[in-house]
């Protein structure tokens, strides 16, 4: 992560989490910077998947849902405010997403 963000003005520390459930290991590390673009690098069983896939869609959806729920609970977003979108949440994000599972399906 530090390598990927070395030329950027970063915002906050690197967030890293790993979790295994139902024989599927998920690892994700991300950090934000002051740029508008994002750089999310996804892998399945150590194979780079530049086109994304269901793992990328699930990551973005879960992250957006979690941030919206937090923002509502803390009243950062008021009742009348619209939820943040996936694009809002990943703006300036640099992330590495790694999924390890048995019998992946690549297309």
Image (cartoon, rainbow, N blue to C red):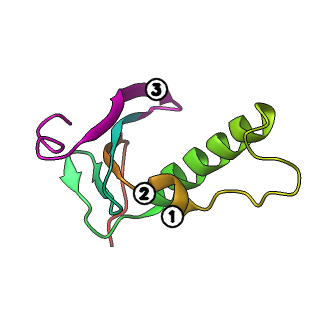
Crowding around mark 2 (Cα neighbors within 10 Å: few <14, some 14 to 19, many 20+) is some
Task: Where is residue 43? Give x, y as percent.
Answer: 27, 50
Quadrant containing the C terminus in the rendered view: bottom left
The residue depicted at 78 percent of the width and 40 percent of the height is: 72
Asked if the residues shown at circle 1 and circle 2 are in contact, with their CB atoms under 8 angstroms apart, the answer is yes
The residue where tag 2 is placed is 91
Q: Which mark is residue 35?
A: none
Q: Residue at x 41, y 64 (%)?
A: 53
Q: Nearer the viewer, residue 61 or 39?
A: 39
User: Which residue carries the number 1 mark?
Assistant: 87
Q: Dot 3 corresponds to which residue?
A: 19
Residue 91 picture quarter: bottom left
In x, y percent, where is residue 98?
32, 42
* Quadrant location, the N terminus: top left
- Asked if residue 17 lies in the magenta stretch, the reply is yes
**Circle 2 — which element?**
loop
Figure check: 89 above or below 50? above
Crowding at mark 1 (Cα within 10 Å: few <14, some 14-19, many 20+): few
Q: Which residues are magenta?
A: 1-25
Which is more toward the observer, 12 or 56?
Answer: 12
Decide whether residue 44 is among the magenta residues: no
Pick the front one: 107 or 41: 41
Question: Residue 27 location in percent, x, y?
Answer: 36, 34
Label 1: state its secondary structure: helix
The numbered mark, 1 or 3, whose residue comes first in the sequence reads: 3
């Amino acid at each position: 992560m530090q390598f990927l963000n070395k030329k950027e003005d970063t915002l906050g520390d690197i967030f890293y989490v790993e979790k295994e459930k139902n024989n599927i290991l998920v690892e994700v590390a991300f950090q934000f910077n002051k740029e508008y673009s994002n750089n999310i690098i996804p892998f399945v069983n150590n194979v780079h998947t530049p086109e994304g896939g269901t793992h990328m869609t699930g990551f973005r959806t879960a992250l957006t849902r979690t941030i919206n729920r937090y923002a509502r609970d803390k009243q950062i977003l008021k009742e009348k405010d619209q939820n943040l979108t996936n694009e809002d949440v990943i703006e300036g994000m640099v992330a590495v997403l790694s999924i390890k599972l048995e019998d992946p399906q690549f297309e």
